[in-house]
Amino acid sequence: MLVKKERSVPRRRNYLVLPVLGLREKVIFPRMRTPLIPTRPRDVNAVKYALLNDERILLLPQKENKEDPSPEDFIKVGTIARILESFDPGDGTIRIMIEGFARAEVKEIIAGEEFFQAKVVPVEEPGEKDNVTIALMKRAISMFETFAKKSKKVPAELLMYVYKEEHPGRLADLIAVNTTIKPDGLQKILEAIDPKERLQTLLVLLQTEIEILELEERIQEKVRKQMEKNQREYYLTEKLKAIKRELSGGKEETEIDELRRKIKEAKMPPEVEEKALKELERLEQMPPMSAETAVIRNYIDWLISLPWSVYTETKIDLEEAARILDEDHYGLEKVKERILEYLAVLKLVKKLRGPILCFVGPPGVGKSSLAKSIARATGRNFVRMSLGGVRDEAEIRGHRRTYVGALPGRIIQGIREAKSKNPVFLLDEVDKMSVDFRGDPAAALLEVLDPEQNSTFRDHYLDVEFDLSDVMFICTANYKHAIPPPLLDRMEVIEIPGYTEYEKHKIAKYFLIPKQLKAHGLDEKKVKITDQAIYRIIREYTREAGVRNLEREITSICRKVAKEIVRKGELDKPVKVTAKSIPKYLGVPKFSYNKANERDEVGVATGLVYTQVGGDIIAVEATTMKGEGKLVLTGQLGDVMQESAQTALSFIRSKASELGVPEEIDFKKIDIHIHVPEGAVPKEGPSAGITIATAILSALTSRPVRRDVAMTGEITLRGRILAIGGLKEKVLAAHRAGIKHIILPKDNEKDMVEIPPEIRKTLKFHFVERAEEAFRIALREPPLKAKEEPEKFDFIPVHRPTEGLIDTPQP
């Protein structure tokens, strides 16, 4: 609670005790009158206390701009002021008019509950002047005159007051409050009790302000001159344009002439050149700031930039082309042979209007890089366009010029990028296009890829014909069935199969490892990766048809070896990466392939399957139990595979007595359960028919199935074995799993040329036409028939084995 004291200003040992009004970012000097609006509760209470007493208050600047200061946050010199007027608006603040009349040194600040109080000693300012003081005063007045001239904000009346002021301390205060010196500088002047010291402080601060004003003047002068220069140049330019328009009726003749010259030099077809010149005439008539001007100029630039008559010389040397293909890709002999045939015909006819090549195969087998190799072998420029996710026809044909920001389609953009009219143009992922309300991009590609139509290809943006017949288009896809039939009809599909383990090993050894060693600053003197280590990486750390993941794993090994070398310094001998040490670099194996059974088992037959990432073996399990004649199928079998199982069972039931099924077995009183591990993996296809039939017959007759025999083939209701696909991958999977004998359909005998010779030498192939032949090879006699050698079996020979490919036992 604020109360009025009996004595207006309490004095204790020559001290005055006054309420404190804190000032933030502001300094008030003696003889200075100014309004204030305190808002903080402590400041408002201090003002009210002063109003209740003798209206005197201490104005004390804060060192920092704090909302809730402590006694240590105030400077040690303040100004004793008198409150001349006050007004309380009732919103928690108070408005006052104050006038400072004396400096005061603060001896102590007392933090009360409602406001601060300070013990202060008023400062008596002597008015005596010696020669030094007089010189400082003259210098201060002179500098203030300079400041006033440069700032142009000091009124003339103020200068008169400065000239009349004879007290040195008051002169410093008067000049200080009428300059642009910042509050921290004004605090230094307020704290300077001695007039000489105060004047010297003022001169230093005032000199800084004058230098800032001079710098601003120089900057302003530069800006003014630059603006005058720009205005003059603009005026002269516009005047020159006006004179040119007056003389020739054209505008910006130099630019128009340059465009006209470029149109002539582009050697466009006559109709295209005529179109370009018409657009150029329109450009001449357009106002410079018109939006249409930029559209026409951009269109003309596109016409000029296209290679209408620029060709790269096609150099076709079949031996060199074969060398380049072998250098860039291992294996793929059929693919390389077809490419060389294509190049040979191209060399003879010069301009080949034949089918478009389309490489179809799994990811990572080298489809895109083959296209690059063709470009390299022919000496043509190469450009690639990815069609993955394209669903707008305008991506192929371009947008019409009526749309804002329209551009040509990606075909024309690719031609401009290639800078020649006969590049090798790769259309990548042609099977990944989709259709929506904006059109079908596959339909737009029909004109591009049809040799009978692409000589008159018309882009929507250009709206003129462009001849694409000299472009060598090559497409790639992962799945043949995903390519729209009309588009597929215009292509010659070249299947690129997945690599075998042997091929992957060679690619890794001779291509990937040297490439990654070089990329990581290593060489064969520092790192040695053994053949067995490469095979383990292929089998246990990758499962793919190509070699992309194989390269990633090799890269990971190189990084870890590089880190090991950097940590330990140069090693005495190279780091040897063996099959045993692979987990050290790559962690635990990520994949595992199935292996052949360890013993002959009843009701368990080994089949061969083909997947997108290669081949594998599967175990087909069959068992019988009392029941009602049901066939139970488990293991996520697809519809086709379920039908194959039903077909196999029907065949065995129809030939039960001939196949040795015991007479006491009543199919109406037993259930047959067929299971194909792994249960979480979906399985589909008809090629497991003979495997299922063998497993069922083994379970019914208790005859074990040979562990070293694997089989594949579709079975019919009459017991015929039909051809299958993926032969190469299936045979390689059998070889990897340790299988010795493979039962294959007779119709697949012609496909044995696909099997690498080093694999054919280690396996025995049995080609059969009927299921009975397969049963005689795969099934042993019941266990009671003892002493049967594992590698000898009896069967009915049905054909003469092919020499070198088939090794079948004689009867």
Image (cartoon, rainbow, N blue to C red):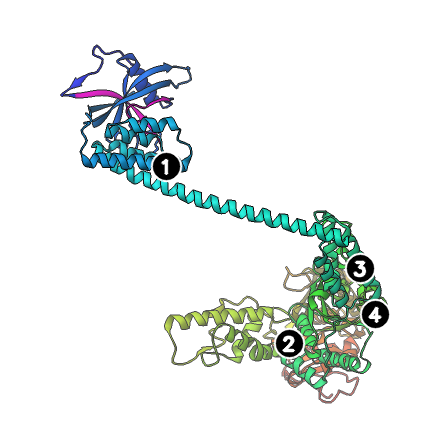
Q: Gap between marks 3 and 2, in whole Å?
A: 59 Å
Task: Magenta stretch: give its range.
Answer: 15-35
The quadrant where residue 677 appears: bottom right
At label 1, the amino acid type is Phe
At label 3, the amino acid type is Leu
Q: Earlier in the sequence, mark 4 or mark 3?
A: 3
Q: Earlier in the sequence, mark 1 or mark 3?
A: 1
On the image, the x and y values in percent for residue 690 come to 74, 72
Q: Nearer the viewer, mark 1 or mark 3?
A: 1
Dot 4: what SS?
A: loop
Q: Residues within 10 Å of mark 4 (few under 14, many from 20)?
A: some
Q: Residues within 10 Å of mark 1 (few under 14, many from 20)?
A: many
Verify whether residue 32 appears in magenta: yes
Residue linked to disc 3? 277
Quarter placement of the N terminus: top left
Dot 1: what SS?
A: helix
Q: Does residue 20 appear left or right of residue 280 in this picture?
A: left
Q: Gap between marks 4 and 3, in whole Å?
A: 30 Å
